[in-house]
Amino acid sequence: MKSTALICRSLSLREVKLGQKQIDAAAENLLALNAKIDVEKMGKASFLMIITGGQFAYQRKDGVWVVPIGCLKD
């Protein structure tokens, strides 16, 4: 009997910041870390996300998602 295994890997980068004033610094950190990833070995990150204590989710112009922690429940 022949079997085939399918391995799916998905890479994402996340950072938690409680204050809105820290979002720009967090985005810079994520973008810098993303630039260091060897995409040939690890693959490209599917998304970059900052988890905040804010109220609204949005995507920044640089592609980084800003998401309130309350959106992640359930």
Image: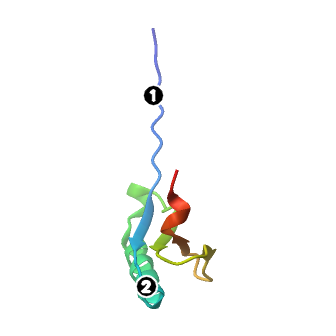
Residue that badge 1 annotates: 5
Please give the label number shown on residue 55.
none
Please name whichever residue, 9 or 16, is drawn nearer the observer in this view of the structure: 16
Q: Amino acid at mark 2?
A: Gly
Residue 66 screen position, x and y as percent: 54, 75
Does the rendering let one see residue 46? Answer: no
Residue 12 screen position, x and y as percent: 45, 61
Q: Quadrant of the N terminus?
A: top left
Q: Is residue 4 left or right of residue 61?
A: left
Residue 56 screen position, x and y as percent: 61, 76
Q: Nearer the viewer, mark 2 or mark 1?
A: 2
Q: Is residue 19 left or right of residue 74?
A: left
Residue that badge 2 annotates: 19
Residue at the spot 45% in from the left edge and 78% down from the top edge: 31
Whole-number angstrom distance, CA of label 2 to CA of label 1: 43 Å
Q: Amino acid at mark 1?
A: Ala
> Mark 2 packing: few (<14 Cα in 10 Å), some, or many (20+)?
few
Residue at the spot 62% in from the left edge and 75% down from the top edge: 58
SS at circle 1 = loop
Does the rendering let one see residue 13? Answer: yes
- Residue 15 vs 4, above or below: the answer is below
Most extreme residue toward the bottom is 21
SS at circle 2 = loop
> Mark 1 packing: few (<14 Cα in 10 Å), some, or many (20+)?
few
- Residue 9 vs 12, above or below: the answer is above
Quarter of the rendering containing residue 25: bottom left
Please name whichever residue, 11 or 2, is drawn nearer the observer in this view of the structure: 11
Q: Are marks 2 and 1 in contact (CB under 8 Å)?
A: no
Residue at the spot 60% in from the left edge and 73% down from the top edge: 57
